[in-house]
Image (cartoon, rainbow, N blue to C red):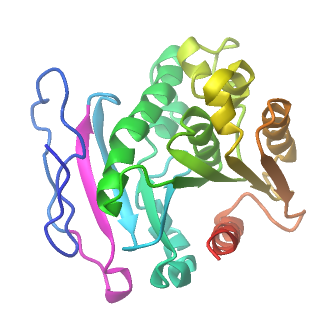
């Protein structure tokens, strides 16, 4: 079933066909209209079952025109986390000016990772399946919504969302052209009871994927850009950001580490300042 829109505040159906196999019992094709206040009247969301990740997941959208930006949630977050933590309010001037459209998916892989669901192998595999869902289901939904196949998409995210933002560009530079990673956690292996990354995980993590890149994939990635922003206050780890930058730089991939200093902590207060600032600069 193709994605379709049936008027303001309504976003119906999964963005791609169900593919091989039978539709799981109880899976929903569509959700009813979601309405917000006048300030948030351009909010839409869709929820569908994906065989790639083995569950239902939501994609939310704010704004009607502008540069599409896919913002990944933090570890336990969902598609509407940005609204609850007032990020959408911070982005309101850019949204109202038609300079950006914000999309956000559920953090399916992040929840599996940090809730320690299943075996380490399962958790590592889910990172791969999650990015397959993003590439083959979420991206077509964004194209459909923008009415432009192949429109360049930017990514952003904080904490583990920063990992996914960078990974999306490195893995699919044909789709994602720029990323903003804020207060990133990039060495995910330290959160798992295993010393050996699986082959599926190596296809997702920039720390393992990028050193193995070559050929046309690497050539295209060298035309993209990754901004790596971080504070140096509580719960921040500047070394994580420079670790990612070192891996990218060794392969000639454009990137920039921007440290905001010790007054900025691993917190939404920091990220509500960072994301509007960079998106404002990039859309002028």
Determine whether 274 is above or below 148 in the image.
below
Image quadrant of residue 104? Answer: bottom left
The residue under the point 73% across, 57% down is 266
Residue 105 placement, left or right of 275: left
For the C terminus, the quadrant is bottom right
Image quadrant of residue 52? Answer: top left
Q: Is residue 205 visible?
A: no
The residue under the point 53% across, 68% down is 85
Q: Residue 240, image x and y in percent?
A: 80, 40
Q: Residue 209, image x and y in percent?
A: 66, 24
Front-lying residue, 142 or 92: 142
The residue under the point 50% across, 47% down is 76
Determine whether 6 is above or below 113 in the image.
below
Residue 39 drawn in magenta: yes
The residue under the point 78% across, 35% down is 248
Q: Residue 126, image x and y in percent?
A: 46, 26
> Range of the magenta residues?
34-50
Q: Residue 204, image x and y in percent?
A: 58, 28
Front-lying residue, 25 or 151: 151
Determine whether 229 is above or below 140 in the image.
below
């Amino acid at each position: 079933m193709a994605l379709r829109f049936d008027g303001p505040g309504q976003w119906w159906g999964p963005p791609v066909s169900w593919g091989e196999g039978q539709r799981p019992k109880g899976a929903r094709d569509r959700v009813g209209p979601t309405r917000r206040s006048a300030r948030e009247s351009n909010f839409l969301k869709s929820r569908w079952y994906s065989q790639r990740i083995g569950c239902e997941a939501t994609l939310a959208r704010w704004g009607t025109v502008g540069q599409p930006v896919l913002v990944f949630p933090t570890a336990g977050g969902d598609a509407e986390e940005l609204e609850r933590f007032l990020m959408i309010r911070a982005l309101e001037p850019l949204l109202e000016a038609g300079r950006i459209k914000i999309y956000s998916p559920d953090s399916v892989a992040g929840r599996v990772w940090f809730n320690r669901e299943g075996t380490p192998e399962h958790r590592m595999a889910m990172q791969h399946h999650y990015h397959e869902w993003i590439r083959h289901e979420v991206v077509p939904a964004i194209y459909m919504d923008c009415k432009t196949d192949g429109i360049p998409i930017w990514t952003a995210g904080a904490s583990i969302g920063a990992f996914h933002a960078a990974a999306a560009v490195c893995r699919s530079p044909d789709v994602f052209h720029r990323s903003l990673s804020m207060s990133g956690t990039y060495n995910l292996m330290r959160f798992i009871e295993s010393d050996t990354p699986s082959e599926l995980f190596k296809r997702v993590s920039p720390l393992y994927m990028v050193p193995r890149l070559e050929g046309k994939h690497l050539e295209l990635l060298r035309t993209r850009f990754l901004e790596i922003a971080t504070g140096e206050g509580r719960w921040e780890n500047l070394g994580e950001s420079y670790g990612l930058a070192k891996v990218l730089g060794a392969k000639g991939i454009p990137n920039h580490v921007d440290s905001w200093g010790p007054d900025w902590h691993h917190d939404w207060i920091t990220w509500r300042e960072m994301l509007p600032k960079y998106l404002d600069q990039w859309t002028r």
